[in-house]
Image: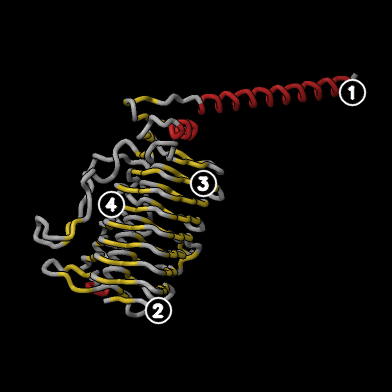
Amino acid sequence: MGKSCFNAEAQMRRGFANLFKKVALSVLCMAVTVTVSAAIETVNTTTVKVETLDDLIEALKDASIETIIVKKCITLEDGTVLDGQTTGAKNKTIQVEEPFLPADGRVRIGLAADGKTTQIIEPEEGKYSTYNLFKIEANSKVTIKNVTLMGGFTGTRTVGDAPSVGGIDNYGYLDMEGVDMLRTGTALLNRPNARALLVNCNIVRNANWYGGGILNFSQRDGDTDNYINGGTLVMENCSLTENESLGPAHGGGAAENQGLMLLNNCVVANNASTEIGGGINNCKGGKLFVMNSTFTGNITTSEEYGTMAGGAIGNAGGASHVHIVNSILAYNGYDDGESVVSSSLGRYNEAQEVHCTMQHSVYD
């Protein structure tokens, strides 16, 4: 009798377990169904709003749609391909509700209202979206082609090492070709161990407290002053123009590099920084390789470092290395508020070795 009861109890437990699995599977299926069924919201004949990746991909396929407004940050899954070029149509625009910088926001080199020769455009507080366009998870491979991207801003004035982004927050592997990114609070944040390849892309008129256009990030090694696992960024036939860093620390109007950054056949022009590196700030063990490229019209206004901040490139020295081949660095400078003094390469940490080499290049 006892054995029979034991068998009955065991059968009952198995029955409940199977029932639980069926219910759990049903709930999971229901959740997935709800997620993918979000409707595309029509704004006008050429503009729509979306919330999901599926709806974004569907909108990209519609030749009549020119602008796609993303209502919240969308995670791009492994294998995602976003292509904004449809047959007979121009590239589409994907943007947040309100981009970080106003439409006329740009760096202006020339006499400004406050008397300075370099004008830094600040965002209008409360008038921009506080989320970024996309997030790419670790180990996910994503391709973005033939689109214009405009993002928001996710932070406040950056303190310490904490980064913020308004465009693409990349933890994985990103390939971009024929993409314009503008009016964003950092177009691309390349996280530690992340990889990004940009070909024929334009990073224009973006801003942040540091790393205005791009931030190639690393991480601190425990409690030491060393930084490890920096991101890898390769740029081919790209431009970084009229980007700016706004904060009192770090710098990098066009980009801040803390990892491995390679530029080939690129133009870095008319960027501005209130601190180090009007063009690029290379620091925290960053390795910067520049080939067949031009840096011109970049400005730093750093009162602390002056010409040593580097109008084109500021290098921390020590574990940070800069290698330049067959390139031009000309007409970059330090703006002291009264005049602009020539400054292309800067070494702002005099206690460290320079670690900068140039071959077959011109600089002033």
- Name the disc covering residue 359, or none: 2
Which residue bears the numbered disc 4? 205
- Residue most toward the front? 88
Inter-mark Cα distance, 3 to 4: 24 Å
Inter-mark Cα distance, 4 to 2: 31 Å
Q: Residues within 10 Å of mark 3 (few under 14, many from 20)?
A: many
Which residue bears the numbered disc 1? 3
Locate residue 309, reporting x and y percent.
27, 71
Using the rendered view, name the quadrant where residue 33 is placed: top right
Name the residue type under label 2: Gln
Which residue bears the numbered disc 3? 142
**Is tag 3's residue or tag 4's residue first in the polypeptide sequence?**
3
Q: Residues within 10 Å of mark 2 (few under 14, many from 20)?
A: few
Q: Is residue 6 above or below residue 114?
A: above
Mark in front: 1 vs 3:
3
Q: Residues within 10 Å of mark 1 (few under 14, many from 20)?
A: few
Name the residue type under label 1: Lys
